[in-house]
Image (spheres, rainbow, N blue to C red):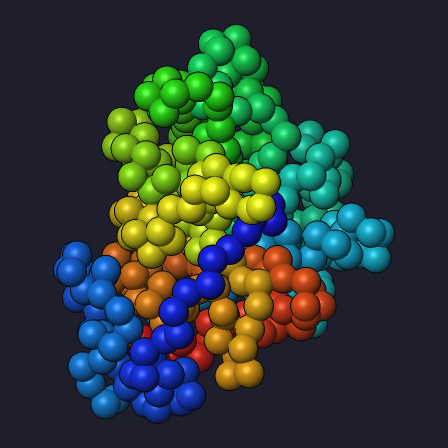
């Protein structure tokens, strides 16, 4: 999941004022495309703010992937750690950390019990390793669709609202789009009867092209099929020295937000003031708010300078600070 990142121009003077605590409000006129694409300085229109974030914070399990993969913690301990160590009350699971337990009701019951014991809500299971729902090969795509059925059932059993999937396939943009519309449509039809959403993250390849993914969503045209905009996964094609073709992250998030059923706050590194150095969180969270989103924003820390625990807390502090200003 680690993707190379470009560094962006330093925030405007107005954005710097916002992130150092000056109480101001950003105008959030929904549907104003010019404001959605404008910089932070264009958004400042008032000298007061409500002090209440417009969203809630969750924790994506991938933020602790090193500890989980290294055996320092177990999947069953994730909910308690989320609440006790970080003060966060909602979690987003990754299936690879309990990949053989999708149909193990006793295990899923224990996950739910441990989450309930500490007052943590279970929101999403992020699915990897089950095949590409955009595979142009009919047989491979149908196998991928069927592989996801058990995770739809597991999500329902846990009380989640969604599974996150990958619209991956090899071929032309048109061929993969056509296949993804079919694969997502079939899986969403199965999931609809279980009140589960099927949401697609920008996760490399064509899916990291916001326009392409929005086009797929328009063609699927199902209420329970949507997107999971990630602030950082916009590398369409990788090269020898990193990302060879990177989509504009602000444009991409703006294109995906009309279909968003969750949002992923990707973070890597922070400056001395606590600002994320790859993404302007004020500008990005304004895009999120301008589209009328008031759900959970999931922390997904992937940095290597801070420890996983420190990175999660740095991201949480930044989201809380920006959230109270918008």
| Quarter where residue 78 is shown | bottom right
- Residue 227, located in which quarter of the rendered image? top left
Is residue 263 visible from the viewing direction of this image? yes
Q: Quadrant of the N terminus?
A: top right
Residue nearest the observer in this picture, 220 or 9:
9
Q: Can you give x and y, in whole percent of width and height, for residue 213 in the image?
A: 35, 36
Quarter of the image where one finds residue 21: bottom left
Q: Quadrant of the C terminus?
A: bottom left
The percent coordinates of residue 153 (x first, y second) are 57, 31
Viewer-nearest residue: 33 or 304: 304
Query: Where's residue 94, x and y in %?
Result: 63, 44
Task: Say above or below: 84 vs 97.
Answer: below
Q: Residue furthest top?
A: 139
Q: How many numbered marks appear?
A: 0
Asked whether residue 164 appears in the rendered view, the answer is no
- In the image: residue 288, left or right of residue 29: right
Judge from the rendering whether residue 149 lies leftward or rightward of residue 167; answer left or right: right
Please give the name of the residue rendered at 78% of the width and 48% of the height, measured from the top-left corner. Answer: 69
Residue at 25% x, 57% y is 291
**At x 77% / y 56%, what residue is drawn?**
67
Horizontal side, residue 121 vs residue 171: left or right: right
Instruction: Work out whether residue 179 or residue 74 is closer to the camera in this orientation and state it.
Output: 179
Residue 61, image x and y in percent? Answer: 64, 53
Q: Where 215 falls versus 160 (above or below)?
A: above
Rendered residue at 47%/54% (across/down): 232
In front of the other: 162 or 65: 65
> Where is 43 relative to 201, above or below?
below
């Amino acid at each position: 999941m680690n993707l190379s990142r470009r560094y962006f121009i330093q925030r405007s003077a107005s954005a710097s004022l916002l992130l150092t605590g000056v109480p101001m409000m950003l105008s959030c006129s929904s549907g104003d495309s010019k404001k959605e694409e404008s910089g932070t300085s264009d958004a400042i229109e008032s000298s007061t703010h409500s002090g209440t974030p417009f969203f809630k914070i969750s924790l994506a399990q991938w933020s602790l992937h090193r500890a989980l993969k290294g055996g320092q913690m177990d999947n069953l301990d994730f909910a308690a750690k989320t609440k006790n160590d970080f003060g966060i009350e909602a979690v987003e699971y990754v299936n690879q950390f309990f990949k053989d337990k999708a149909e193990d009701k006793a295990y899923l019951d224990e996950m739910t019990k441990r989450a309930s014991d500490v007052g943590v809500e279970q929101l999403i299971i992020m699915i990897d390793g089950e095949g590409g729902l955009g595979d142009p090969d009919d047989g491979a795509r149908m196998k991928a669709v069927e592989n996801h059925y058990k995770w739809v059932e597991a999500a329902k059993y846990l009380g989640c609202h969604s599974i996150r999937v990958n619209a991956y396939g090899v071929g032309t943009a048109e061929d993969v789009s056509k296949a993804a519309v079919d694969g997502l449509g079939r899986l969403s039809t199965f999931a609809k009867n279980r009140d589960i959403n099927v949401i697609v993250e920008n996760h490399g390849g064509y899916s990291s092209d916001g326009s392409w993914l929005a086009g797929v969503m328009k063609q699927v045209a199902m209420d329970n099929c949507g997107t999971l905009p990630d602030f950082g996964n916009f590398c369409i094609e990788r090269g020898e020295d990193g990302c060879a073709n990177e989509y504009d992250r602000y444009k991409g998030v703006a294109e995906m937000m009309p279909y968003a059923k969750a949002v992923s706050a990707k973070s890597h590194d922070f400056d001395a003031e606590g600002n994320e150095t790859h993404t302007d969180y004020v500008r990005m969270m304004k895009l999120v708010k301008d589209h009328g989103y008031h759900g959970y924003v999931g922390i997904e820390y992937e940095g290597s300078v801070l420890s996983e625990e420190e990175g999660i807390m740095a991201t949480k502090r930044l989201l809380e600070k920006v959230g109270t200003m918008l």
